[in-house]
Amino acid sequence: MVDTNFQISTSFDPFADAMDSDSDVQIPRSFDPFAESKDLGARGTKKEYVHIRVQQRNGKKSWTMIEGLMKDFSYEKILKDLKKEYCCNGTIIQDKELGKVIQLQGDQRNNVSKFLVKADIVKKEQIKVHGF
């Protein structure tokens, strides 16, 4: 005969220690990859970083975005030289929060960072490359 008078105990919780509210672990609620640029605007940070990002368009196509260059530079001239050097299309976008942003066709992150250092526009330590 099978005993059918069994009880399931619900007081045992194997994850109780991990979920204890006294732990020092903090779980981030949200992450914004552009927060660093938005906080103080273009070239407003202490170290004045230039951010080079890649943005997926569709399929294998992508854009390379360059933001944070000093306002003293001629964006048109830099864009012209980048387009000539790396045979790619590009434009300058005026963003409300970030100011002027250079946008190039394709994944040109490494090429752009080398170009900016070689042209003595920024130092290598001031470049932050983001993407995939």
Image (tube, grey):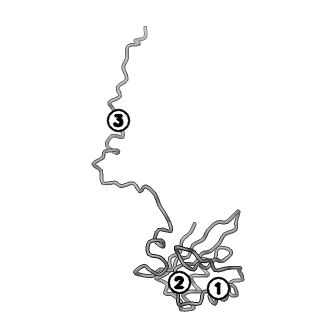
Q: What element carries label 3?
A: loop
Mark positioned earlier in the residue sequence (1 or 3): 3
Measure the alpha-carbon separation of dots 1 and 3: 61 Å
Q: Which residue is more in the foreground, 38 or 79?
A: 38
- Give the image location of residue 114, x and y in percent: 57, 84
Relative to 26, residue 68 above or below: below
For mark 1, does the 10 Å Cα neighbourhood hold few (<14), some (14 to 19), or many (20 or more) residues?
some
Q: Residue at x 60, y 82 (%)?
A: 112
Measure the alpha-carbon separation of dots 2 and 1: 12 Å
Q: Residue at x 62, y 77 (%)?
A: 93
Single out the residue that lies furthest toward the left.
22
- Give the image location of residue 23, x and y in percent: 30, 50
Q: How many marks?
A: 3
Relative to 26, residue 126 above or below: below
**Amino acid bearing label 1:** Leu
Circle number at residue 69: 2
**Amino acid bearing label 2:** Leu
- Give the image location of residue 101, x and y in percent: 58, 78
For mark 2, does the 10 Å Cα neighbourhood hold few (<14), some (14 to 19), or many (20 or more) residues?
many
Q: Which residue is drawn at 62% across and 74% down?
A: 64
Measure the alpha-carbon separation of dots 3 and 2: 54 Å
Mark positioned earlier in the residue sequence (2 or 1): 2
Of discs 3 and 2, which sits in the foreground? 2
Q: What element carries label 2?
A: loop
Q: Residue at label 1?
A: 79
Q: Residue at label 3?
A: 13
For mark 3, does the 10 Å Cα neighbourhood hold few (<14), some (14 to 19), or many (20 or more) residues?
few
Single out the residue that lies furthest toward the top.
1
**Amino acid bearing label 3:** Asp
